[in-house]
Image: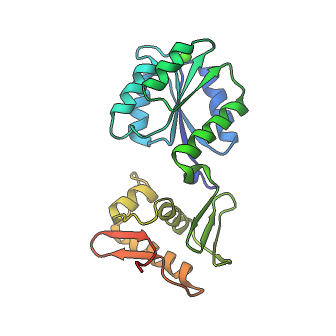
Amino acid sequence: MSSALKPLVLIVEDEPGIAEMLKYNLEKEGFRAVIAVNGEEAMLVTTEQSPNLILLDWMLPHLSGLEVCRQLRRAPKSKDIPIIMLTARGEESDRVRGLNSGADDYIVKPFSPSELVARVRAVLRRTSPALAEEVLRFADIVMDLASHRVRRDGHDIHLGPTEFRLLRHFMLHPGRVFSREQLLDLVWGHDVYVELRTVDVHIRRLRKALNEGGGEDPIRTVRSAGYAIDTKPS
Ligand code: CA
């Protein structure tokens, strides 16, 4: 799996040993991970990198994990990002408060790396099923994210890396129309300078590859709005 396809986990933890251990184990299991050492940094990283999930330690300097959780839930950009709180053993009332403040789950320290990874996967599966899955399906198109294979109606489709990311993006949001600007931002990344018409070029390539074996064109062009993967209204 290329790195852009892996879910990004933000680790908010001030103890370097624990933060590095978490990062190491998540990366080993196919996630990307980034560390923030306090609440302020966590808010900043969240805004800039839109992580797919946040592991939030309860005990942080300055802003407590609980307060960070509340702030994340209030901010439009982060209100839907799943949060797992890391708490010390026995702090039952803390856990309840954590869940009340908007956390999706909590995990009690000390925990084993495999337990943690299992919880991360479980929360992702619940909150964003497509991210936890390794295989995406739309109509007769099957995308295996792990092996990087795309098949349509049982036949292999060969895509370049950009077309692969485009298709993945569409398949994660079937029926939703994305403008060229949005696609540039979401598929190419906002720090890359690419002309808008580049999007059209790659859409054309994606379309050609998908439709080579016949069958209906799954990419819908919405005039002056953008593109979507869609089935024709019947
Ligand atoms: Ca801590």
Residue 22 pos. (x, y %): 64, 30
The single residue placed furthest to the left in the displayed view is: 224
Q: Quadrant of ligand 1?
A: top right
Residue 171 pos. (x, y %): 51, 64
User: Which quadrant of the figure contains the C terminus?
Assistant: bottom left
Instruction: Say whether residue 31 is left or right of residue 181.
Output: right
The reply to whether residue 59 is visible in this rendering is no
* Residue drawn at x 37%, y 76% as measured from the top left: 221
The single residue placed furthest to the bottom in the displayed view is: 214
Residue 78 pos. (x, y %): 39, 38
Instruction: Say whether residue 15 is left or right of residue 179.
Output: right
The single residue placed furthest to the front in the displayed view is: 234
Q: How many marks?
A: 0
**Residue 152: which quarter of the image?**
bottom right
* Residue drawn at x 48%, y 41% as measured from the top left: 51
* In the rendered image, the vertical position of residue 58 relative to residue 43, given as above or below: above
User: Which quadrant of the figure contains the N terminus?
Assistant: bottom right
Specify how the rendered protein is coloured: rainbow
* In the rendered image, the vertical position of residue 81 relative to residue 128, given as above or below: above
* In the rendered image, the vertical position of residue 103 relative to residue 231, given as above or below: above
Residue 99 pos. (x, y %): 48, 25
Instruction: Say whether residue 182 is left or right of residue 1.
Output: left
* Residue drawn at x 56%, y 88% as measured from the top left: 214
* Residue drawn at x 29%, y 76% as measured from the top left: 223
138 or 198: nearer the viewer: 138
70 or 179: nearer the viewer: 70
The reply to whether residue 230 is visible in this rendering is yes
